[in-house]
Image (cartoon, rainbow, N blue to C red):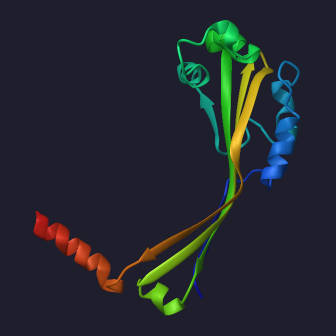
C-alpha cells in the first residue's frame, strides 16, 4: 500500500548496456549525423538532448588553458578550430524506480519513510562538424542503488513545528 514512482527518459535504449553498446557503434570521423538516429542517438528526435553552445563546449573540452592544441584529441582540436561550425549534443538517458519500504502506518503518518531508489543513467557527448562525428565520450551509472531514509519524531506534527519555528524567528 506504499507509493511507488519511476522516471524514464523515453529512450529506445532500455538499459545502460544497450546504451553503451549503441554508443560504441559511433566512430569519430566515420559516423555521419544521419546514422545516429537508427542507433538511438537522434539529436532532433530524442528527448533529453541538449545542444551545447560553442563557448560552453570549449570550456568543457579544454578545462585548462595550459593544455596546448597539439595535446588535445584530434576531434576536439578540429572542433575548436571550426569554432561555431562545430556542434555538440549531450544525451541524458535514464531509468529510475523509487519504491517505499517499511511499515504503512509509520510512513502514512510521516514518522518514518524509507525509499529504495534503483536504476541506471547514461550520458553521452557527441561532437559534430559538417555532419560528421568528430568526438564522442560517455559517462554514467550502470547499476545505481541508494536508500533514502527520513525520520520525523513528531510524525504528522513535524512540519507544523518547523512552520511555527520559522514564524517565531520572524
Q: Give left or right: position of 151 versus 100.
A: left
Q: Is residue 127 left or right of residue 53?
A: right
Residue 150 in the image: state x and y as whole percent: 44, 74
Q: Nearer the viewer, residue 69 or 30?
A: 69
Does 8 sit left or right of 58 as displayed? right
Residue 55, image x and y in percent?
53, 19
Q: Residue at x 88, y 21 (%)?
A: 30
- State the quadrant of the C terminus: bottom left
Foreground residue among 103 and 128: 103
- Residue 20 locus on image (x, y percent): 81, 44
Would residue 139 be seen by someone viewing this image from the given angle?
yes
- Visible in this render: residue 123? no
Residue 17: give x, y in percent of width and height: 83, 51
Q: Quadrant of residue 155?
A: bottom left
At horizontal 54% and vertical 24% (from top left) the residue drawn is: 56
Residue lying at the far bottom in this picture: please name it: 105
Residue at the image position 29 percent from the left and 84 percent from the top:
157
Eyeballing the image, is 61 above or below 24? above
Amino acid at each position: 500500500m506504499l507509493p511507488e514512482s519511476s522516471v524514464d527518459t523515453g529512450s529506445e535504449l532500455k538499459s545502460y548496456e544497450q546504451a553503451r553498446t549503441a554508443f560504441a557503434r559511433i566512430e569519430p570521423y566515420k559516423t555521419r549525423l544521419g546514422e545516429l538516429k537508427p542507433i538511438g542517438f537522434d539529436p532532433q528526435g530524442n528527448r533529453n538532448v541538449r545542444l551545447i553552445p560553442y563557448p560552453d563546449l570549449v570550456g568543457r573540452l579544454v578545462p585548462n588553458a595550459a593544455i596546448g592544441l597539439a595535446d588535445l584529441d584530434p576531434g576536439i582540436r578540429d572542433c575548436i578550430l571550426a569554432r561555431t561550425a562545430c556542434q555538440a549534443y549531450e544525451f541524458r538517458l535514464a531509468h529510475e524506480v523509487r519504491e517505499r519500504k517499511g511499515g504503512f502506518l509509520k510512513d502514512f503518518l510521516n514518522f518514518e519513510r524509507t525509499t529504495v531508489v534503483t536504476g541506471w543513467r547514461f550520458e553521452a557527448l557527441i561532437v559534430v562538424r559538417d555532419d560528421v562525428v568528430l568526438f564522442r565520450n560517455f559517462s554514467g551509472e550502470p547499476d545505481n542503488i541508494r536508500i533514502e531514509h527520513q525520520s520525523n519524531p513528531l510524525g504528522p506534527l513535524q512540519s507544523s513545528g518547523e512552520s511555527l519555528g520559522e514564524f517565531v524567528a520572524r
